[in-house]
Amino acid sequence: MGALRQLFVRAAMATPVDLRGRQIIVSGAGPDSLGYATARTLATWGATVVVSTCSAVTAEAAAAAISAELPANCSGRVVGHALDLSDVASVERFVDWYRASQGARLDVLINNAGIHLDLRAQWQTPHLTVDGHEIHWRTNYLGTMHLTQRLLPLLRDTGRQQGMARIVNVVSMLHTRGRNAAMFGGSASLQPYNSWVAYGTSKLALVHATREMQRRYADDHVQAYCLHPGAVLTRIADKGLAGQHALATLRRLFAPVEAFFLLTPEEGAQTQIHCATQPGLAGGLYYRNCQPVPASKEADDAVAAVRLWDETQDWLARIKQDAKDTRT
């Protein structure tokens, strides 16, 4: 069966790298996820890896499970902590905890966490978060940018001291469904609403952000990458099909077929592992199967990228001020 599957599914594999002494964050590392598989490999190669999920219980359980799977002589270490990208306070707590418990070094930030809801595209209007943003945009893009911005001082300091730090943004080939126009004007810009376009737009925004990070921070030895992991069998579709009992049952019946044709989390994790670890890798690019490939035409719009960056910085400044006002 394995040889037959290789005729249909071919996954490039990252080359092992000695990561002893490196400190890496992998967001979104629940069971059977890309993040879980990524963290396990990086720890096996010797890194100290911080993993996150939305709850402390599941994050700590993931860290314990990964630790139990490491080789007996492995110097790698895995620690878990809660992180909800859609919650400003959760991001702030995570960063404060990291600084207090892990110190000032951060070699790699892998922005793996994300959501894709309403896979049947039945929502007629956007589902909004408590602060009024479309849920995919708030979680996948704004939350990722908030986390990255708060950790950027550590990445820049590490880059200058160690010669290299990296930001790895897990996007998707579905960024091709995103629209630059939909990035501006809030949820009204997504009308008529389609959850797949909303998801794609959140990932397109991260492609833009990757290129802007590279342009702005490469002089500090911070390299930025984005990537498509491939079609991977994970639990992300479980949330996307929430409430669709008949379809979920049908999917369970065809699980062996899915497992045959889709990448395993371990296989799907290879490109983000590659981007996080391989020496001399060109930054600011979009990767697939451990190779740089062209992104969508929309992603080549440099004017939209700069406008998005500026508007995102304004939003980050507002939430920073709001946090100060709350404390006082």
Image (cartoon, rainbow, N blue to C red):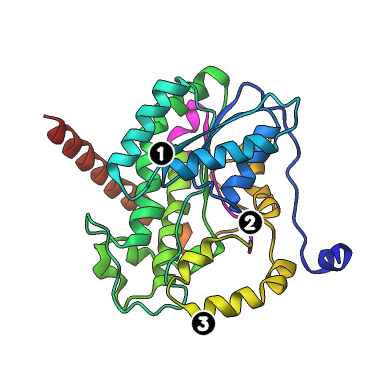
Q: Which residue is mark 2?
A: 293
Secondary structure under tag 3 reads helix
Residue 148 badge: 1
Structural distance between the alpha carbons of marks 3 and 1: 39 Å
Q: Looking at the image, tell me whether mark 1 or mark 2 is earlier in sequence order.
A: 1
Which residues lie in the magenta part?
A: 214-232
User: Dot 1: within a 10 Å radius of its alpha carbon, few (fewer than 14), some, or many (20 or more) residues?
Assistant: some
Q: State the residue lying farthest toward the right.
A: 3
Residue 52 visible at all = no
In the displayed structure image, the side of residue 326 where residue 227 appears, left or right: right
Placement of the N terminus among the 4 image quadrants: bottom right
Is 78 contained in the magenta span?
A: no
Q: Nearer the viewer, residue 89 or 250?
A: 250
Q: Position of residue 26 (x, y in %)?
A: 53, 40
Structural distance between the alpha carbons of marks 3 and 2: 38 Å
Q: Is residue 54 above or below residue 115?
A: above
Q: Disc 3 vs disc 2: which is toward the camera?
A: 3
Structural distance between the alpha carbons of marks 1 and 2: 24 Å
* Mark 3 in CB contact with mark 1 (< 8 angstroms): no
Q: Looking at the image, tell me whether mark 3 or mark 1 is earlier in sequence order.
A: 1
Secondary structure under tag 1 reads helix
Q: Which residue is mark 3?
A: 246
Q: Nearer the viewer, residue 28 or 211?
A: 28
Secondary structure under tag 2 reads loop
* Mark 3 in CB contact with mark 2 (< 8 angstroms): no
The kind of residue tagged 3 is Ala
In the displayed structure image, the side of residue 61 where residue 232 appears, left or right: right
In the displayed structure image, the side of residue 63 where residue 10 appears, left or right: right
